[in-house]
Image (cartoon, rainbow, N blue to C red):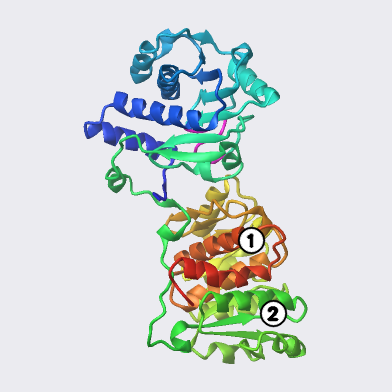
Amino acid sequence: MNDEILSVEQMYRADRLAMAAGIGGERLMEAAGRAVAATARRLLPRGRIAILCGPGNNGGDGFVAARLLRRQGWAVRLGLLGGVDVLGGDAARMAGRWTGPVEPLGPALLDGCVGVIDALFGAGLSRPPEGAARAVIVEIARRNLPVVAVDVPSGVHGDSGAVQGLAPDCVATVTFFRPKPGHCLLPGRLKCGELVVADIGIPDSVLDDIAPSLRRNGPGAWALPGIEPGGYKYSRGHALILGGAEMTGAARLAARAARRAGAGLVTVAAPPEALGIYRAGDPGLLVVPSEPFAALLADGRRNALLLGPGGGVGEVLAGKVLAALATGRACVLDADALTSFEGRGDDLFRHLSDRVVLTPHDGEFRRLFGAVAGSRLERARHAARVSGAVVLLKGPDTVVAHPDGRAAITTDAPPTLATAGSGDVLAGLIAGLLAQGMEPFQAASAAAWLHGRAATIIGPGLIAEDLPEALPAILAEMGRRP
């Protein structure tokens, strides 16, 4: 899979680079229209299809699809926003090759139609659809017609995934060369349906010039650490997890996940009054008193640190966070470790580096970073830049961002992950991978993907305790046996 994600401007640049390399715009548009027609044939019911064309290149793609579908025996009604005389460039040439009628865009165009191709507006649209375009989108929804979109569903912002006023709910969206952020971020992703990324002849070599920094998260973006035949438990790393006295399940879930992720040893440090609870759990888990905490940190073999799950909000935990950061070791800060710095993020940020992973959900993000506008991608990148740490911003479109601008979007995690304790498991997965020597950005990305993959395999009825137990099968499937 080609995992790079291009912004709208980067995609325009890819088009220009392809044309500079001798690949004509007409050729690209013909290939795009062919891909749209093929998807429509596969997914739309056989019958009359309404093709909605806009005044730009998206409309040109629609004219190509209309011509090809009619040639293949499909009944087509083509509606155009504006007049043919306002079309320019390749779109005008494609309109000239269409020999059927061109009707004015409007709700009546849908009469007698069983499906729609939305070729109105591309990813560059920066305002809500208005007038005839809005009216026809509203009518599509009222009639519950299946839609195949060209590039993005009209009304979805290509860079943010925001729905600008309204957009059709599509059975599929056909985009070209590489996906855009709006295909991967919510709510736009939910409007797209099946995402078809069509090869229209743009060479991969254009990416050398564009140098994209955003990817879809998946195994193509990282490699899990291997297990050496001559290795031993300490060579596989030792994760130290700070547990609390009350919400003891959080650290236990994290510890189980860290062990399943492959850490050779996992220690939970807990207050004296809770040691019995932790020791009554998994026999392979090491449990020690959390005081003196400095003495625990003095053992350099504990090479990955996780603080926050069930740790208890306050100055005591904040002090332990700063002590952990002072070691310079790979560190995950989750939940209470973040909230303990609410309203004074700078007190934390000055101690951070890209060796640290922050894992906030939206509420914790606001407590630490304040109200930041924009998509999840924009907010995660902002947080990584101002904090200097790797930021994993949790949600249905989880984003991992590095301070240098790199980012990854997880697009296939199911909503069943919205259950108590799943975030603790995610934090533990990151810690377990860090213990084995993965770089923090890759470890956070891999953990987010494994987390989602485990949830997909488990399916409905998932509880957090199930997630670590799904890992052995996933790792074996990937060719890495723990």
Left or right, 394 with reference to 31: right
Which residue does the image show at 31% across and 46% down from the upper left?
207
Magenta span main SS: loop
- Residue 125: in sight, yes or no? no
- Let me know if residue 152 is in the magenta part: yes
Please determine whether, in this image, residue 316 is positioned above or below residue 417. below
Dots 2, 1 in contact, CB < 8 A:
no
Q: Nearer the viewer, residue 413 or 430?
A: 413
Residue assigned mark 1:
368
Mark 2 or 1, nearer chain start: 2
Label 1: few (<14), some (14–19) or many (≥20) C-alpha neighbours in 10 Å: many
Residue 319's spot in the image, x, y percent? 63, 79
Q: Which residues are magenta?
A: 151-161
- Let me know if residue 15 is in the magenta part: no
Residue 445's spot in the image, x, y percent? 49, 62
Residue assigned mark 2:
316
Which residue does the image show at 66% across and 85% down from the upper left?
282
Which residue does the image show at 53% across and 25% down from the upper left?
118
Please determine whether, in this image, residue 267 is positioned above or below residue 58. below
Residue 253's spot in the image, x, y percent? 66, 74
Q: Nearer the viewer, residue 450 or 134?
A: 450
Label 2: few (<14), some (14–19) or many (≥20) C-alpha neighbours in 10 Å: few
Q: Secondary structure at mark 1?
A: helix
Which residue does the image show at 43% across and 76% down from the upper left?
437
Q: Secondary structure at mark 2?
A: helix
Residue 260's spot in the image, x, y percent? 56, 76
Q: Amino acid at mark 1?
A: Leu
Q: Amino acid at mark 2?
A: Val
- Residue 398: in sight, yes or no? yes
Q: Nearer the viewer, residue 260 or 314?
A: 260
